[in-house]
Image: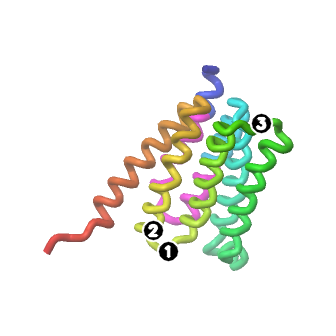
């Protein structure tokens, strides 16, 4: 493993973790923007084209969603469809333009982060933390598998920590209180 490649992923992971320490949604989205920028470069360095392009899409998504509280256009629900359609287009482009060989294994592996990206696009529009956690519990393991198969240490650690955080949040906030 190239040390510089993994260091870029670790920086992305750090920004992702720091994002959840922000008070408001805009701050979270700005740190997510930084995280996805570093992960874009990281996946490019790993020659994981789908992961790179989906993270570029994540940069755009974070930029749009960071404006939700101040710009009416950014709060429109059409963005869910725009980002989900773009994720599917990236999947197709990975094979048609960027030369990924369409083996059964790669067709499945490259689809995992596409599904995760679409689910995350929906989760960022959810009004409550419980819904965000449930959807994130579905998307994080998909990225975790993709990261492991592509040798992304920062991505693997980041999604592992996300899954743990989701369970902690579910336990702390979402479980029914016993009378």
> Separation of disc 2 and disc 3 at Cα?
34 Å
Which one is earlier in the sequence, the residue at label 2 or at label 3? 3
Judging by the rendered image, the residue that carries numbered circle 3 is 100
Verify CB contact (< 8 Å) between mark 2 and mark 3: no
Q: Point out the image quarter for the N terminus.
A: top right
Which one is earlier in the sequence, the residue at label 3 or at label 1? 3
Residue at point 58% right, 29% down?
151
Q: Point out the image quarter for the C terminus.
A: bottom left
Viewer-closest of 98 and 70: 98
Q: Position of residue 156 (x, y in %)?
A: 51, 37
> Separation of disc 1 and disc 2 at Cα?
8 Å
Verify CB contact (< 8 Å) between mark 3 and mark 1: no
Q: Classify mark 1: helix, strand or loop.
A: loop
Foreground disc of the pair 3, 1 = 3
Foreground disc of the pair 1, 2 = 2
The magenta segment is: 9-33
Verify CB contact (< 8 Å) between mark 1 and mark 2: yes
> Separation of disc 3 and disc 1 at Cα?
37 Å
Residue 31 belongs to the span the image colors magenta: yes
Residue at point 58% right, 33% down?
149
Viewer-closest of 167 and 4: 167
Residue at point 64% right, 20% down?
2
Locate residue 164 relative to residue 107 in the image: left or right.
left
């Amino acid at each position: 493993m190239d040390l510089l490649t993994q260091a870029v992923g670790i920086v992305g992971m750090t920004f992702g973790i720091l994002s959840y320490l922000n008070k408001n949604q805009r701050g979270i989205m700005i740190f997510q923007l930084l995280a996805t920028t570093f992960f874009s470069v990281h996946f490019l360095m790993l020659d994981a084209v789908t992961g790179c392009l989906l993270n570029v899409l994540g940069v755009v998504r974070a930029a749009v969603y960071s404006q939700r509280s101040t710009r009416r256009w950014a709060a429109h629900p059409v963005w869910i469809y725009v980002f989900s359609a773009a994720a599917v287009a990236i999947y197709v482009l990975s094979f048609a333009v960027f030369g990924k060989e369409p083996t059964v294994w790669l067709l499945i592996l490259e689809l995992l982060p596409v599904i995760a990206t679409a689910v995350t696009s929906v989760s960022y529009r959810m009004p409550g933390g419980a819904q965000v956690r449930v959807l994130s519990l579905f998307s994080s393991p998909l990225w975790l598998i993709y990261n492991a198969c592509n040798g992304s240490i920062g991505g693997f650690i980041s999604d592992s920590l996300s899954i743990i955080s989701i369970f902690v949040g579910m336990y702390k906030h979402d479980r029914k209180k016993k009378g």
